[in-house]
Image (cartoon, rainbow, N blue to C red):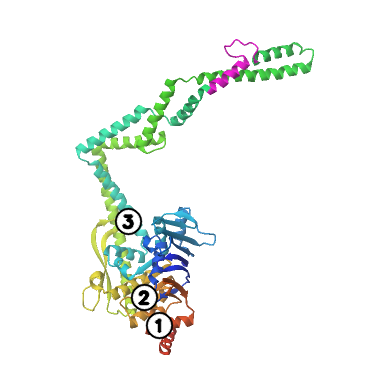
Amino acid sequence: MLQSLHIENVAVIEKADIAFSTGMTALTGETGAGKSIVIDAINALLGERITRDVVRAGSDKAYIAGVFDGLPREVEARLRELDLPPEEDGTLLIQRSLTADGKGNCRINGRPTTVSILRELGRMLVNIHGQHENQVLLQPERHVEYLDRLGDLGEPKAAYQEAYQRYCRIRRAIKATTLDESEKTRRMEELQQQIAAIDEAKLRVGEQAELASRRELARHSEKLVSALRLVRQAMGDDDSGDRRGVLTRLTDSVAALHSVGQLSAEAERLAQRLQSCLYDVQAVAEESGDLEDSLAFDETQLAAMEDRLALLQRLFRRYGVDDEQGVLAQREEMQTQLDAMESADAYLAELERQSDEAREATIAAAQVLTAARKQAAARFEQDVCRQLTFLDMPHVRLEVSMQPAPLTAIGGEKVEFLIASNPGEPPKSIAKTASGGELSRIMLALKSVLAEVDDIDTLVFDEIDAGISGRAATKVGTLLRQIAGCRQVLCVTHLAQIAACSHSHLLVAKSVENGRTYTRVDDLEESARLQELARIMGGEVTDTTLSAAKELRDRAVE
């Protein structure tokens, strides 16, 4: 649920802090006051398109922030996947800014994010419906989505899509296998060349790391050899002829102590300890010599290492991997493709067999999905027609048309909502039948039926009252209030009959100060609500319009 909205320097709104409550909230105000700007700000907050002309004239940056609470499980799960967990109190903070030169910034719980992620989460949090957004209802290809959501057909739909995707994968494999001969020959030669190049390289896992380490040693070998030579000279274990090195002195010392060992037990113990040290020093001398020998690099060896590393890097870049294991994995995959092409006839026959099985499984899953959709369609027709009757459209009948169609990702039928406006008339496409006012009420009827199965907690209706008035407007307001029993509903309206049904009422007012336009949003108490309802009804607030406003309000909340 949208808990609060902060707006800075957006169009005529310099600064506004709006607190939203549960239930139904009405937003009213004179034409041009900025009601739609509030909806545009919510849209922008949810990742929809925003342009730099939204930045208030004379300002450097527009800024919008919103706090959501009571997050749906789907949103919480997605936030965890994105490593953007909610705050400790379970709230979600979304921020978006746009500078006058068109640069934008998005944050979720204080962490930078992208507009696409914002849009993905936004569509799980809020559903905004306006008079100009009825085109969704006018698109027959979208009707199946409504039906599947109402019927809670997630399981049979997922089973069908899994079967259909497997069938499509097999068909793609068949297409790839039945390439024309020239293309097949070209591809086989390409695979053979790539495999040969990898084999010729004689890759060994871990080789790059070893070579890089040896290259580093080679680059500093002169310094290392110099240090080791000093060590061996000090020990007298080199070719310098120095017989007074550490090893000679230690050997002489051990012999001297042993010679008096029979005279002194302490001298013998010292001889044994010194003998142990002599062994360690001899080992160091030998290992120093071995290490010095291994560091005897020349320019030819270093050049060979550089060439080998360059070869490995070229292979890594070519196949988009980081190490030898990745190249070898690519080689195995190419070998598999080559083997498949070389034994194409047998492989193709097996694929055709699998394709037949997959098609049968897909048809069976499609039949299950179709049967479930027909059951959902019957309930949907009854529920929507009942709501249309309530909305003073008793003769309007909705019918769900389901015509067989070739298998696609959505199933084996074409689904379309048809409307019969008058008794005795055949149902026709909504786009060809419904007027603007009828379309608004039809969409509202659909929304009310879907409200119970929709996971989105906040519904925004922007001027859904277009084209309706009188008794129909009262019915629309009553239905919106009913929907608000299980969802948060925000409604921009020009009709008192609808505003009177709301649980809370926000007034968007515009004023001019020092030659500049300012818009503010006020949360109205009951007495102020009656004043606003009276203004909407009569243009002027009089005792008569106030009395009518009170009567309207009393009837709405009965």
The three-letter amino acid code for the residue at tag 2 is: Thr
Kindly report the distance in space between the C-alpha atoms of the residues bearing marks 1 and 2.
13 Å
The percent coordinates of residue 404 (x first, y second) are 23, 61
Identify the residue shown where x is 27% and y is 44%: 173
The percent coordinates of residue 333 (x first, y second) are 34, 37
1 or 2: tag closer to the N-terminus:
2
Identify the residue shown where x is 74% and y is 10%: 259
- Which of discs 1 and 3 lies nearer the camera? The answer is 1
Give the quarter of the image for residue 375.
Answer: bottom left
Give the quarter of the image for residue 336.
Answer: top left
3 or 2: tag closer to the N-terminus:
2
The three-letter amino acid code for the residue at tag 3 is: Tyr
Q: Which residue is mark 3?
A: 160
The percent coordinates of residue 16 (x first, y second) are 46, 69
Q: Which residue is mark 2?
A: 31
Q: Secondary structure at mark 3?
A: helix
Identify the residue shown where x is 64% and y is 14%: 245
- Which of discs 3 and 2 lies nearer the camera? The answer is 2
Q: Is residue 76 magenta?
A: no
User: For the residue carrying disc 3, how many other residues have a C-alpha within 10 Å: few (<14), some (14-19), or many (20+)?
Assistant: many
Residue 535: assigned label: 1
Up/down of 259 relative to 106, above or below: above
The percent coordinates of residue 430 (x first, y second) are 26, 70
1 or 3: tag closer to the N-terminus:
3
Up/down of 543 relative to 69, above or below: below
Q: Point out the stretch of residues depicted in magenta.
A: 223-245
Residue 21 falls left or right of residue 270:
left
| Residue found at the far right of this picture | 263
Q: Are marks 1 and 2 in contact (CB under 8 Å)?
A: no
